[in-house]
Amino acid sequence: MRPIDPLHAFVFRPFALPFSQKPFPVEETTNSDSLMDTSEEPPEAEDVLHFGREWPKILPHLEKDLNAMIAQQRATIEVQKERWRPVIKQEKLGQAKSFYDEFERVLATGTILPSKLGGGGVYILYNALDEPSFIIKPNDEAILCLNNPKHRGSPFNDTSHRLRDQIPLYKTCETEVSVSALSREVGIGHCTPDVRMMILSSPLFYDLSSHLQGKEKELFNAQCGKPNGEKLCSVQRFIPDSLDLQQAMHEWFEAGLEEHFPLPIDQEEFEDVLLLLWLTYDADGHSSNFRVFFKRLDEQHKAVYGIIKIDNGLSLPEENRYLLNYLGYFQNAKLTPSKQLLEKISSIDEQVLDAILEQNHLSYARTALKDRIDVLKILSQRSSITLEEINHRFEFLSLPDGKNLALSPLSPQEITDSLQETIHPASTTKRKSSKERAQAQAHQLLIKV
Ligand SMILES: Nc1ncnc2c1ncn2[C@@H]1O[C@H](COP(=O)(O)OP(=O)(O)O)[C@@H](O)[C@H]1O
Ligand SMILES: [Mg+2]
């Protein structure tokens, strides 16, 4: 059992305190949670299947081939599920047996209920005492997948209809499982939940046909194939007594912590989470995808908090093109890496991590991961490099010829300035497309280097 915060520094109360001056970088409006629609928002009249936000792109297909597209997606979803069934059966007997056994024990007397949190389909398994115990996320309910229940569904599945250009759709399960396996392998398994794949059924799982009735529904299913309440899902333990980082920051600032102070987070855990994000190149590391919990008291009897990264579904891209790591901007990142972190980095076994990606059908992400490991091993050997500088250099990987830029001899100040100009330009200035800008800037930087 985790200790309860003796200082009650966490006051669990709902409030929304907008900062008049944002002390931390303004979050991208494209993070997946902020794009969330609630199912209460009425769709347009013609959008009988409640696709929601994507509807304008779907409308031209309505008369033409929408049902054929849905039929194809339904079939693909089934094929993917069946491909994993024998693997999951094996896993249940192997080293993950205790995880599966515990889940099944809770499931036998518990209740699965949908949650409004997040932008994808998220379900909570409550135990017999009504305590949240597991988080279940069906693969086909992620944002831009066919059965997204929060008005972000889509019948498309091609490179031009992705949430992130470098991450294929319908990969959240495999990605979450890979990230959890990868973190265990690197010795930082505590900084993200243990995630396993399961094939589960619930009458509450969402299917886009649920909005149709009677004959209309029959005709739709005859044309598109039957809906299936049995789904491929990722399953992870619910993190008890934790708060999302955004809320925790409000609490800390209300309690008097100033913006230029380090957050009261255990430095070793903070470093481990940074390492995780460098390895995964997470495109969704916004503040609500980190959870913090009371860990211990320090020598001055002040509370120190642990931190865990959740929601790794938008990571392990095909190319290193978009890193969103909220932690990279905190005072806690101004320190140099600890000896323990350096040891973890130097002992990363690239081949083992590569095998994890291959086993989980993420071969497309292998080259980009290899590049990140190469860069990380080199950077971590530089004397007096800070965590922040490593993070900034990792952002450079997003630019054309990013590997050279990340390893360039630019000073930390030059790096910060260049990032401001390229990856985080002021939003008010009229500017070139992000690709043109990145290319022009990369060219200039290489001349400097
Ligand atoms: N393991 C967990 N423990 C506690 N809460 C969780 C856990 N996983 C998810 N949540 C809660 O559910 C929300 C949505 O889950 P998330 O994985 O972020 O889904 P999405 O991919 O839709 O953003 C999170 O912001 C968090 O509040
Ligand atoms: Mg999320």
Image (tube, helix red, strand yellow):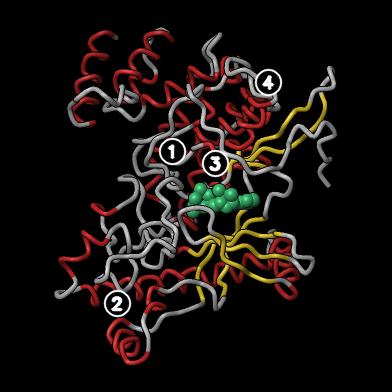
Q: Earlier in the sequence, mark 2 or mark 4?
A: 2
Mark closer to the observer (2, 4): 4
Q: Nearer the viewer, residue 186 or 290?
A: 290
Tell me: is circle 3 under 8 Å from ligand 1.
yes
What label sits on residue 445 in the rendered view?
A: none
- Kind of element beneath mark 1: helix
Q: Position of residue 213 (x, y in %)?
A: 37, 86
> Which residue is at the front of the view, 167 or 304?
304
State if disc 1 and disc 2 touch (CB < 8 Å): no
SS of the residue at dot 3?
helix
The residue tagged 3 is 288
Q: Are there few (<14), some (14-19), or many (20+) residues within 10 Å of tag 3?
A: many
Q: Is residue 99 above or below residue 4?
A: below
Residue underneath mark 1: 369
The numbered dot on residue 256 is: 4
Whichever of callouts 3 and 1 sits on the residue coming sooner in the sequence is 3
Q: Residue 71: which disc?
A: 2
Judged from the image, the secondary structure of the residue bearing numbered disc 4 is loop
Question: Which image quadrant is residue 408 in?
Answer: top left
